Image: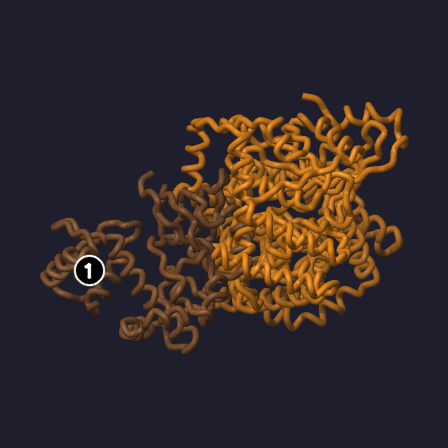
Chain colours: A orange, B brown
Amino acid sequence: MTNVTTDVKNKTTSLKGKNTPLTFALAGNANVGKSVIFNQLTGSNQIIGNWPGKTVERAEGTLSFEGHEIKIIDLPGIYSFSTFSMEELVSRDYVALEKPDAVINVVDASVLERNLFFTLQLLEMNTPLVLVLNQVDVAKNKGILIDKDHLSTILGTPVVFTTATRGEGIYEAIKEAVKVATSKPKYTPIKYRKDLEEQIQKLQQLIEKEQIDLKYPSRWVAIKLLEGDTEITKLVIEKSKTVILQAKLVIAEFEKNCQEKCFSIIASARYALANSIVASSLQQDEVWHPLTDKIEWFTTHRIFGYVTAFGVIGGLLLWTFVVGNTLSGLISQGLSLINPIDPELSMSAPILSIIFNGFWGGLDAGLTLIIPFVIPFYLLLALIEDSGLLTRVAFMMDSAMHRIGLHGKALIPIILGYGCSVPAIHSCKIMETRRERLLAAFAITFAPCSARTIVLFGMVGLFVGVHWALLLYVVNICIIFAMGKIAMKAVPGKTTGLIMEMSSFKRPSIKVVLKQTWTRTKSIIYVVFPIYIIGSALIQILYVYDILTPISNAFSPLTVLWLGLPAFAGVLLLLGTIRKELIIVGATAMLGTSNLLVGFTPIQLVIIALVAMLYIPCVSTIAILAKEFSWKTAIIISLANISTALIVGGLTFQLLNLFV
Amino acid sequence: MQRSTQDYLKVMYSLSKNAEMVSNANISQKLDVSPASVTEMLKKLADEGYIKYSPYQGSVLTEKGLKEAQRVTRKHRLLESFLSNVLRIGNDKVHQEACQMEHALSDEAEESLCRFLKHPDTCPDDGKTIPACDLPFCNCEECIQLHQKGLEQVGKRDKNLISIRDLKNGTFGKVSFIRGEHKVLQRLLDMGLTPGTKIQIIKVAPMTGPVKIAVRGSKLALGQDIACNVFVEVEEHTK
């Protein structure tokens, strides 16, 4: 067990800059450990951004290896190169047009046949390839033995075994990739079944004769034309009508002979080939896994499955509050030693007050929220995710999620939303269509994130009663469902069904879990921290120059008459747009005591907490909504939140007045 | 074929899942007929080879009976979709209407209706699967392409197909037909569900949840709305 990254770097420093820089792309199905390999290779030298003009994440990193400066691009995890998703289009254009020096195809060794389907498509593109069989430990556990050399001979590419989570085989993989990139071996294309191959050759020759320069390899264009690929057909039409007409004739005749559609024939042919390759290079022994089977049985059982699902979600939240509260208390104590919040300051030295109360206050809130609540939450969530338990929860909850126009996979971003909306909305990318991403993001803006939960328990739990706080929590979940249902009707389109791979349970890898936690936490630090700090300073400016009161007075018909709150609640709700917990902090400061019952009746506490949970996504969330969707979307969602809060809050106030 | 025969087969089809026994009492209740006449009719159906009848236990559809039952059920459910989705007739009335119309609908009209409705997958009133047609296609695009030239020449499928959402855990089957739009079809092909692929139903989640299947060494969860469009020839019922 060696740390490959340091290994790789140690061997290289002396030779740095000797050779021309290389570019490698990592390609493969989702969940095969591609990102783990990417992290192993590039360590901290990563730039995560989007592909130009697309909402598809682009991860890029660098590495020096035996005198080569290597740029690594981590392509999105996809199953095929058809163009039904942005991810697939981006990946195939990158491989075909940008022509990386080598493509490292990461493959799950325990699901070889399905993965080879994609490998064959990479080979069609005639790209320099290294096949990395990852998770060989898992495969071995399942009784799968693969003949690496045989596989390498058939495919004509180097094949490397890796166990990425332990760093095994990464060095060899990169070495082979460098070899392939520098020697540029000639590939003989892999042949499909004879009748299909004839049609491919026919079209390929035609394309070469007509000399249409598409920048794509001609064999690949021929296959794509046969598949009826809309993008490629469009490109070819612009260049040559003859090719298209011929292609149509070829397809029509071939389909008539086979009594099957061409795209289906090609998919079948690829799988038939993958199947025969697997048959000749893989040996599978029956292995009995009583424990995994029992866990599998339990987690998808018709009763215990739901017990597990609710247990997982409930446990995750419970863990967050217990750990979060303890840590939060400790950190606040530590920070209070340098307590800067000093109302006296605002009178005598406004600038100092803005700097200390504003900036420092923002940083303080960031530290007491993110570290104690969000990190433990993401840590446990990553553990649940990496073990495979979360997929089972998604499996069990699929039919419930359908009621709000989403499928089981959407559960993952929504659960993330219980920590913080920002990474949750960011993770909506796992959904297939824009409609689903939008619906999931909308649901998330209502999910009680840790800040809202602090308000709920700090105001209601502490001063009215824990059962009231829990009741509001339940009300909130009902509202998520109700609003989800309304949004589903309002946003045109059909719910796409769930197609989700369910890999077997495994022991989670600590490295992967830590990395995942860090990635999610990082997005909070980059987006939320600055907004916290600037926002707090801004509010402080408004406070110092007494601009808050007039604004809040303007809202008093809503806050005082409709919601029945005390007049100063307007200011609190304004503060809360920056960060929800500022509502408690502000109330404490204004009342001059932490006993909120001095300024609020219990009903008012219930109402303000309820409104605080719903009334607007915080500024950070609005920013991420605008970034992932558009400003228009962000504004519409915010308005929807405000009206929901007003309606629900107002009605609850009237109801409570009647009964209590 | 007599209307009553079709009605019996249709009721048995909707009552039985996974080729389970259907009791006489259930049939008599559903059709609102006396137990004595049910017994008599079942004996007749058994003689004609549509069902296997075991006195005091119940009856089960044979392959021949299943074929006929699926044919009439398909017409019934397509008509329900038409009445509800196109003519906007209330869901409480479509069942009665469809019961009257199904016996008169020709096979050709049924095929056209299916294309006109863009291959609906479930019926509007109770969400049950509309059975696949008996044309020998692997997907709906073949039907769209060929129907102008006339579907008479293409012949019929001889094996009965069942949607994977209506199968028991552990059943093995061969993927034979995937209904619906191109996008979903292509994704399923990409995931390995090509025609002729052998799959196994591992688990159907409760509350009309997803179906978990084993295909080409991987495990996939397919939501109900996808699963109801994946049809297999059942190869083995046992675990």
Front position in the image: B16 or A306: B16
Q: Quadrant of residue A543?
A: bottom right
Query: Compared with residue B191, is residue A235 higher up or lower down, i.e. above or below?
Result: below
Residue A654 placed where, x, y %? 52, 69
Q: Is residue A402 visible?
A: yes
Estimate the x, y position of residue A181 in percent, counting from the top left. 78, 35
Q: Is residue B189 found left or right of A67 in the rendered image?
A: left
Q: Residue at x 57, y 33 (%)?
A: A109
Q: Is residue A312 above or below residue B122?
A: above
Nearest to the observer: residue B25 or residue A266: A266
10 Å crowding of disc 1: few (<14), some (14-19), many (20+): many
Circle 1 residue: B27
Q: Report the amino acid beneath label 1.
A: Ile
In this rendering, position of residue A527 left or right of residue A375: right
> Is residue A454 shown to the viewer in this render?
no
Given residues A494 and A19, the one toward you in this image is A19
Image position, residue A599 (x, y; %) = 64, 58
The image quadrant where one finds the N terminus of chain A is: top right
- Foreground of the two, A119 or B226: A119
**Count of numbered marks:** 1
Q: Position of residue A478 (x, y in %)?
A: 50, 58
Which chain is disc 1 placed on? B
Element class at badge 1: helix
Query: What residue sits 41% from the left and 71% below the top?
Result: B112
- Residue at the image point whose x is 32% and y is 72% from the top: B106
A333 shown above or below B138: above
> Quick check: A550 left or right of A482?
right
